[in-house]
Amino acid sequence: VIWMTQSPSLLSASTGDRVTISCRMSQGISSYLAWYQQKPGKAPELLIYAASTLQSGVPSRFSGSGSGTDFTLTISCLQSEDFATYYCQQYYSFPWTFGQGTKVEIK
Amino acid sequence: QLQLQESGSGLVKPSQTLSLTCAVSGGSISSGGYSWSWIRQPPGKGLEWIGYIYHSGSTYYNPSLKSRVTISVDRSKNQFSLKLSSVTAADTAVYYCARVYITGVFDYWGQGTLVTVSS
């Protein structure tokens, strides 16, 4: 099983801030990493896959980087609708696993 | 636009079997290249992948649940299903169905359905 460590667990930020979320793997996964956004009471939504490929319709202020064991999700200019919980997910090997989540809250 | 909708019992007694169905609309479940998955989220916690079924019927389950899980597909009804046996309170969660795009990326999700295990 590949274990994932997301940090921070909680991030307090203001509209307009640049924020970064980290996801570290217990072993290398090449670029088999996705990022999801989840708002309260809603299903997660796919933001990025293959570590850095933006899903269709996702704003360009979201970006992903990294390969191997260390990955980053960056929101370049935080908007009000971006306050949510973000999860990374590896699909390099079974079982597919998710990070524990990072909640981005209003500062 | 592809849509997925979960349905099933919201309350299951301990030791019984949880049964859910995911109806797919706006596309065929038999479309090549895709598989279909179940994912769950205990209240206030993170996401756990349960398993997937390919349109051909082949399956793969999370080893942590493998002995209790069955995922099946009904192509005539354009839906797939989840059965989880011998449930306990630890199985209380929101259960999501999702389409698997590429291998392992969940691009379309259902809205989720809360299943509570309680006597």
Image: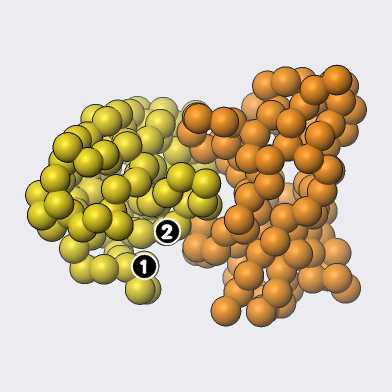
Supply the letter of whichever chain is orange: B
Q: Is residue B118 visible?
A: yes
Is the same chain shared between marks 1 and 2?
yes
Q: Position of residue B10 (x, y in %)?
A: 78, 40
Of the 4 image quadrants, the one containing the C terminus of chain B is: top right
Supply the letter of whichever chain is yellow: A
**Residue occupied by mark 1:** A55
* Residue at (51% x, 57% y) in the render: B106
Q: Say which label, 1 or 2, has the lower sequence index.
A: 2
* Residue at (78% x, 53% y) in the render: B7
Of the 4 image quadrants, the one containing the N terminus of chain B is: bottom right
Rounded to the nearest angstrom, the CA distance separating label 1 from label 2 is 7 Å
Position of residue B74 relative to residue A98, above or below, is below
Q: How many marks?
A: 2
**Residue occupied by mark 2:** A46
* Residue at (21% x, 45% y) in the render: A72
Amino acid tagged 2: Leu
* Residue at (75% x, 64% y) in the render: B23
Name the chain under label 2: A
- CB contact under 8 Å: marks 1 and 2: yes
Q: Is residue A32 visible?
A: no
